[in-house]
Image (tube, rainbow, N blue to C red):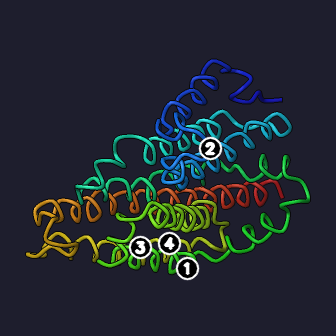
Amino acid sequence: MPTTFAQSHPRWYALALIALISLMPQPALAHGLFDGHLVERAPLILTAMILASAWGLYILGSRRIATRRSEAAWLHGAMLLAAFAVFGPIDDWAEHSTTWHMVQHMLFMVVIPPMWALARPLPQWRAVTGRFAQPVWTAILRVGRYPVPLAMLHGAMIWTWHTPKLYQLALDNLWWHAVEHACFLFTAWLFWWSMLRANPKQVPQALMANLVTLMHTGLLGALLTFSSTSFYGESRDVADQQLAGLIMWVPGGLIYLIGAGWVAWRWLTRMWRRQQAGGSREELG
């Protein structure tokens, strides 16, 4: 029976949890429950609680259902990146730089979600939550069968939150900033999960979903790159916005291409193995 990452690497587990706590906003930890600073930081504290809860449930669930080391590594790496993206210096830099804001968005759309998809944490979460959250897991499993609609939903979130008014709203209000991050993370996770975990019959749809996402994110990136005016107010530098668009367009597009290549490679490998197995049976017959 394979050992879990927690069992084989307890020190790394402890370091990961310590890293998450250390990345939490210090004002939130330093003040009392009814302090004004705590109220202002409430969205960050709630985010930290949700992230820590998801991580903790996975750790508990891995004791009941063993995980592969590779999947555990994907999960813990994604959680550390999520903590760093929300509580690390990137979030502060993003307030004044469109480029760093785009880097943060890319982490939430094309880095952390596919890592979650490759980690396959649902069995561990279901093992801990039991019947209480069963309707949620069932709904997620059913929705994951439709890559194209999920790609359209994720695309709608991308374009909606990159409109000037909502973009600025997320910068000015921590609650809306948290909602923006949640929209990116959740819809991107569903999209990547439906694509990377597609069964052979769903692969054509998954590749189509990837192509659609590659095209519209490339278009948005190109608009930001070639625009001679700032979309997000006079305080934002045009050159900074152009670099942000280039980051979405080129590195982001490359990740989508890598994802499509991985799905196609798995699909072709399965078909080749089936043909080989069929040929062997004919020879034996």
Q: Secondary structure at mark 4?
A: helix
Closer to the observer: label 1 or label 2? Answer: 2
Going by the numbered disc 1, the residue's amino acid type is Val
Horizontal placement of 218 versus 285: left or right? left
Residue, far top: 11
Picture coordinates of residue 137 (x, y %)? 78, 63
Residue 54 versus residue 258 in the image, above or below? above
- Quadrant showing the C terminus: bottom right
Q: Which mark is residue 158?
A: 3
Q: Secondary structure at mark 3?
A: helix
Q: CA distance from mark 1 to mark 2?
A: 44 Å
Of the two numbered discs 3 and 1 on the same chain, state the one appearing first in sequence: 1
Pointer 2: what residue?
Answer: 33
Of the two numbered discs 1 and 2 on the same chain, state the one appearing first in sequence: 2
Q: Does the residue at mark 2 contact the one at mark 3 (Cβ under 8 Å)?
A: no
Near mark 2 (Cα within 10 A), the count class, few <14, some 14-19 or many ≥20, is few
Q: Secondary structure at mark 1?
A: helix
Picture coordinates of residue 154 (x, y %)? 50, 74
Q: Does the residue at mark 1 contact the one at mark 4 (Cβ under 8 Å)?
A: no
Q: CA distance from mark 1 to mark 4?
A: 9 Å
